[in-house]
């Protein structure tokens, strides 16, 4: 079993101590757990009584106590804890070295200053945020907390509000809500009443002003005599003064060891807090099937939908609180309905079973493989891939820049990132690269099990490789593809070889990329193949579009209903070969060529005018969903690129069921297609001018899916367009079926599976 050490700061049996007990009991089902807690305290006794292993400490606790309802900033308590921090940190470091846990979890935001200490020891670190940051609190403290939380591997919040408030992206975020004991969900004994059955309100905050005792006292003054108010949390002598003069019956219950009978006895639970914090009675009442009336703070508003599981009132407004109580007393059916709704919510979010499942899953990720990916910008396919990979292992992505020059930076629109990520601070260089000094500290963090550098051409990547190599830290070098363009001599070759050789493993998507790595010094035995893609399994069509489907889509896009249509997609830059495509298309009557992906420059419009081309259309920028429909509206895809280290548009075209014409300088083409134009023509001549799909023209991937030509060869490109224009529809459909069959092996799911299979390379 993996070993987890919990570090706790307080010996009292408050909310944090109870949460620690419940968290450890749940974790103990799947992990070897211990807790480091103050010696000779109620918390130590409680854990031992429940059979949990404890490491007691006697050194004074050091912490950063700044939260809603906590010590005053730079007040006596705050300064005392600050003075204790160095000795306390030293002690905890000794414990971590001695215990060598697979992970440690700090049970409070106030212990966040210890996170960097644990990280330096190579311990995977999680931290619970159980405290609420003060409204209008110190911006300096907020920035400090965020920096410290960002150092952790994982941050555990008890509400969605806290997760969204802290905005920590460099660590994994998990919502692990406070749980309610199973017995709270049981049916009440003896009808649930303490004495009689008048309408009963329960208040549990004792004499604590932050809990709203003054608000509760003023509201109770407006209750009719037949009402009953139960006051728990403190003995009568401490709390009675707040309820003098009220006409309703008041019962003082003190500090109850078992709250279940109190919730059972109530008709409604009032939570009139005046300072926002996580209020346990809200969901404990829900477990007992009782509605709550809460102060309307956003920090806890997610627990209660107004009018569904309870009611909300303006914080501090005792008149409105009294009105809400009277409303429920007059509408007993509505009161019971809200209670049942609150119970359903508590079962979903706070039952031991639901909380335990989320906790064990989060801790399993924390103690599992943690991988750092260093790459340039968050392009759409990378975001989708990292999201898929994050399902398998704890994934941290470091981007050199937020976006490439001239491109949108809103890559997280399609899906919310599931992976942790951060942007390196640095100087932008070129289109999508950067120079960053901070990369050294990042790649030398000892709590990564593997590091994948997604290139070697930017200063940040070069710096990362140099640092990793000089510190003898194993790493993986990944490539989307590769085309050899030098003879194996010269300065350029020497520089590339210096940065490519020496990796522990190489991630390659194709044979050309294998040869590329080997050319620059990679050990062939260290190459790991993975399928490179921009597609999920659900993005791949089941079959090519039928003639009827094509007709509907062509009408939608205003394309010719009859005749063949070729589709191309990409930016208008010389390397895409669109000048040659326009020239070739001009000599192919009966064919329409549609080019999407951008607006044509004056250069391309000039070519259109000079050659009097009328069968080429420009579709401009389109969304991914629109492009998918456009692929389906056309008959085949053409990508006359002069150089593409991969060419993801080939994947997308094949996923839509289209045959492909591309060049031998497109790695996706030679990997997924392989049939040359000349071989195809030869086979047709040998078969009476027809294409047949027999064993004779099977390739390594399956049946024919398209043709490969040389780049910048306008004549062969034109002949290819003519060939595909004239092929029977059933032949194009068969080629499309073959394309779909092959591309099913190129999905994010399979790409993530190949990456995750590498496992741990840093901790051997």
Image (cartoon, helix red, strand yellow):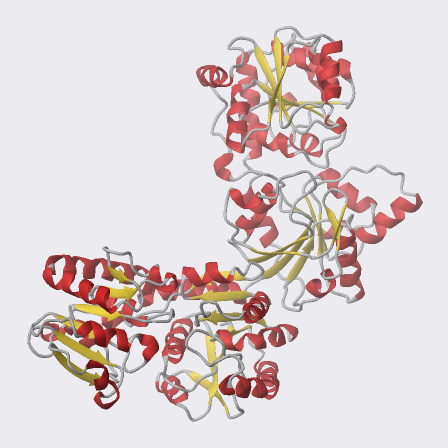
The one nearer the camera, 718 or 514, is 718
Residue extending farthest to the right is 490
- Please state the horizontal and vertical placement of residue 686, each as a whole percent of the image: 69, 11
Above or below, 370 relative to 53:
above
- Please state the horizontal and vertical placement of residue 724, each as a whole percent of the image: 63, 14
Displayed quadrant of residue 484: top right
Tell me the residue at 57%/50% (across/down). Answer: 386
Residue extending farthest to the top is 589
Q: Is residue 231 left or right of residue 630?
A: left
- Please state the horizontal and vertical placement of residue 305, each as a whole percent of the image: 28, 56
Q: Is residue 35 left or right of residue 147?
A: left
Q: Is residue 678 visible?
A: no
What quarter of the picture does the C terminus occupy? bottom right
The one nearer the camera, 320 or 535, is 320
- Please state the horizontal and vertical placement of residue 575, each as a whole percent of the image: 76, 29
Q: Is residue 725 visible?
A: yes
């Amino acid at each position: 079993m993996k070993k987890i050490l919990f570090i706790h700061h307080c010996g009292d049996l408050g909310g944090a101590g109870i949460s620690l007990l419940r968290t450890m009991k749940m974790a103990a089902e799947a992990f070897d757990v211990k807790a480091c807690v103050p010696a000779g305290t109620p918390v130590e006794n409680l854990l031992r009584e429940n059979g949990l292993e404890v490491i007691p400490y006697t050194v004074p606790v050091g912490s950063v106590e700044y939260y809603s309802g906590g010590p005053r900033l730079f007040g006596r308590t705050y300064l005392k804890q600050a003075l204790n921090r160095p000795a306390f940190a030293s002690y905890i470091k000794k414990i971590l070295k001695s215990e060598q846990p697979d992970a440690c979890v700090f049970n409070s935001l106030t212990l966040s200053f210890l996170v960097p200490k644990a990280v330096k020891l190579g311990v995977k670190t999680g931290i619970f945020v159980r405290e609420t940051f003060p409204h209008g609190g110190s911006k300096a403290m907020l920035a400090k907390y965020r920096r410290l939380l960002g150092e952790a591997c994982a941050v555990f919040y008890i509400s969605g509000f806290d997760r969204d408030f802290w905005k920590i992206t460099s660590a994994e975020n998990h919502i692990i809500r406070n749980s309610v004991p199973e017995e709270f969900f049981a049916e009440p004994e003896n009808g649930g009443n303490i004495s009689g059955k008048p309408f009963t309100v329960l208040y549990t905050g004792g004499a604590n002003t932050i809990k709203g005792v003054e608000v509760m006292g003023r509201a109770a003054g407006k209750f009719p005599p037949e009402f009953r108010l139960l006051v728990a949390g403190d003995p009568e002598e401490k709390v009675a003064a707040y309820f003098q003069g009220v006409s309703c019956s008041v019962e003082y219950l003190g500090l109850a060891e078992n709250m279940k009978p109190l919730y059972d006895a109530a008709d409604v639970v009032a939570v009139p807090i005046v300072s926002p914090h996580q209020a346990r009675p809200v969901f404990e009442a829900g477990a007992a099937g009782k509605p709550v009336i809460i102060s309307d703070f956003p920090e806890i508003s997610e627990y209660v939908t107004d009018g569904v599981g309870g009611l909300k009132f303006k914080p501090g407004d005792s008149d409105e609180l009294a009105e809400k109580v009277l409303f429920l007393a007059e509408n007993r059916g509505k009161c019971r309905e809200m209670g049942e709704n609150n119970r359903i919510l508590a079962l979903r979010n706070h039952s031991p079973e639901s909380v335990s499942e989320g906790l064990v899953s989060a801790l399993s990720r924390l103690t599992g493989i943690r991988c750092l990916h260093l790459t340039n910008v968050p392009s759409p396919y990378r975001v989708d891939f990292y999201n898929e990979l994050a399902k398998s292992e704890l994934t941290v992505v470091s981007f050199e820049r937020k976006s490439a020059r001239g491109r949108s930076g809103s890559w997280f629109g399609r899906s919310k990132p599931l992976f942790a990520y951060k942007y390196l601070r640095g100087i932008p260089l070129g289109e999508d690269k950067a120079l960053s000094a901070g990369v050294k500290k990042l790649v030398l963090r000892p709590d990564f099990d593997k590091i994948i550098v997604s290139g070697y051409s930017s200063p940040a990547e070069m710096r990362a490789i140099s640092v990793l190599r000089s510190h003898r830290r194993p790493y993986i070098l990944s490539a989307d593809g590769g085309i050899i363009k030098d003879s194996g001599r010269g300065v350029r070759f020497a520089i590339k070889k210096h940065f490519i050789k020496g990796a522990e493993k190489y991630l390659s998507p194709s044979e050309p990329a294998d040869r590329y790595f080997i050319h620059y010094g990679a050990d062939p035995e260290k190459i790991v193949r993975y399928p490179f893609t921009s597609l999920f399994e659900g993005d791949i069509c089941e079959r090519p579009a039928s003639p009827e489907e094509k007709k509907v889509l062509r009408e939608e896009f205003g394309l010719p209903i009859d005749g063949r249509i070729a589709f191309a997609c990409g930016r208008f830059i010389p390397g895409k070969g669109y000048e040659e495509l326009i020239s070739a298309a001009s000599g192919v009557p009966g064919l329409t060529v549609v080019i999407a992906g951008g607006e044509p420059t004056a250069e391309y419009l000039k070519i259109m005018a000079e050659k009097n081309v009328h069968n080429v259309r420009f579709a401009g920028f389109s969304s991914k969903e629109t492009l998918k429909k456009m692929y389906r509206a056309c008959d085949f895809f053409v990508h006359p690129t002069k150089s593409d280290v991969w060419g993801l548009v080939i994947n997308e075209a094949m996923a839509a069921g289209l045959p492909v014409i591309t060049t031998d300088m497109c790695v996706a083409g030679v990997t997924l297609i392989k049939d040359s134009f000349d071989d195809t023509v030869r086979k047709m001549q040998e078969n009476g001018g027809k294409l047949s799909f027999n064993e004779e023209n099977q390739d390594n991937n399956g049946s024919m899916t398209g043709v490969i030509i040389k780049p910048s060869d306008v004549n062969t490109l034109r002949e290819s367009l003519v060939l595909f224009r004239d092929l029977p529809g059933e032949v194009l459909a068969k080629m499309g079926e073959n394309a779909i069959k092959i591309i099913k092996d190129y999905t994010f799911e399979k790409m993530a599976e190949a990456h995750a299979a590498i496992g741990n390379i840093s901790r051997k």
